[in-house]
């Protein structure tokens, strides 16, 4: 009856056990995912898109993301809660990264943070880890860099494969406890997974990684458009649309509220 720790995840890799991660941003859904036994919940900066309605993850701030982290931490008992550090909150210096991580841990109640980038952020990872902050890396398609990547496209093809492998290895050397591989060819992701002793978490990276992650609104069919790599396990958009229009009809025609929804004097 304790939370999952990074030691549990390291052990899972040694045993060859795969595990799922989902994003989470609010009380009721994170409680459901926790009850379902999802061991790691990521308060992703994808909240920029799915919660706040921004076009990319670039605009979201710590003031917007920290309260969502707090909601997820308060509403879960078992899951390891990892929060993304937003764009601009850690690239400046290791000290800046530590100040950001402190907010997510003190105010947000996160047990770990995630940041994007390879070798460029190794000094940040080193300081965070030495200060007691577990760090999840993220390489491949790093959405905070959409403006330098020139769009949301597959990464690590051809010559770039070797660079991506170096980045992942450097994150491990710096002390990261795991690394997300986003939108990379499956054979490269499998090779990175073999060469690292820390767990790899794939999204659009094939079946050869140690773990998988999806944005929950994507896998539950709430998002209007999803990438090729998403499997939708439910159709919440249809369910909610039907519920809303049936409710609307019943208010208009007087069928709701009925006797059983009504207090007597
Ligand atoms: O913000 C997010 O949801 C993520 C995952 C997709 C890895 O970074
Ligand atoms: Na993210």
Image (tube, helix red, strand yellow):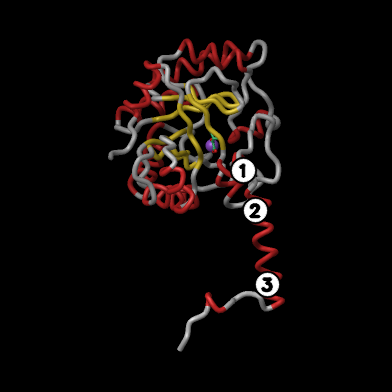
Q: SS at mark 1?
A: loop
Label 2 crowding class (10 Å Cα cut-off): few <14, some 14-19, many 20+?
A: few
Residue sitting at x 41%, y 35%: 39
Which sits earlier in the primary sequence, circle 1 or circle 3? 1
Q: Are marks 1 and 3 in contact (CB under 8 Å)?
A: no
Residue 205's place in the image compared with 3, above or below, is above
Q: Residue at x 68, y 58 (%)?
A: 242
**Mark 3 vs mark 2: which is more N-terminal?**
2
How far across and how far down the image is residue 57, in percent? 59, 42
Q: Which residue is mark 3?
A: 250
Question: In the image, what residue occupies the spot 65% across and 67% down?
Answer: 247
Q: How many marks?
A: 3
Q: Position of residue 83 (x, y in %)?
A: 44, 40
Q: Which residue is mark 2?
A: 239
Location of mark 1 (residue): 234
Q: Is mark 2 within 8 Å of ligand 1?
A: no
Q: Which of marks 1 and 2 precedes in the sequence?
A: 1
Query: What's the CA distance linking mark 2 and mark 1?
Result: 9 Å
Q: Quadrant of ligand 1?
A: top right
* Quadrant in the picture for the N terminus: top left
């Amino acid at each position: 009856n304790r939370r999952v720790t990074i030691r549990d995840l390291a052990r899972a890799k040694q045993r060859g056990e795969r595990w799922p991660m989902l994003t989470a941003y609010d009380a009721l859904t994170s409680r459901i995912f926790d009850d379902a036994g999802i061991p790691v919940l990521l308060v992703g900066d994808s909240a920029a898109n799915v919660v706040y309605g921004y076009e990319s993850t670039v605009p979201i701030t710590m003031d917007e993301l920290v309260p969502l982290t707090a909601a997820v931490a308060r509403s879960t008992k078992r899951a390891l809660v990892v929060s993304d550090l937003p764009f601009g909150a850690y690239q400046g210096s290791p000290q800046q990264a530590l100040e950001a991580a402190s907010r997510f841990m003190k105010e947000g109640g996160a047990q770990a943070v995630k940041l994007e980038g390879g070798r460029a952020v190794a000094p940040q990872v080193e300081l965070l880890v030495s200060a007691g902050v577990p760090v999840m890396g993220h390489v491949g398609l790093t959405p905070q860099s959409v403006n330098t990547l020139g769009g949301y496209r597959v990464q690590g093809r051809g010559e770039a494969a070797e660079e991506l492998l170096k980045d992942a290895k450097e994150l491990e050397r710096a002390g990261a406890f795991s690394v997300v591989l986003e939108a990379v060819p499956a054979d490269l992701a499998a090779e990175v997974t073999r060469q690292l002793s820390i767990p790899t978490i794939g999204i659009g990276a094939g079946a050869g990684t140690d773990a998988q992650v999806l944005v929950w609104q994507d896998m539950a069919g709430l998002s209007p458009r999803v990438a090729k790599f998403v499997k939708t396990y439910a159709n919440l958009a249809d369910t909610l649309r039907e519920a809303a229009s049936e409710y609307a009809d019943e208010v208009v025609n007087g069928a709701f509220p009925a006797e059983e929804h009504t207090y007597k004097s």
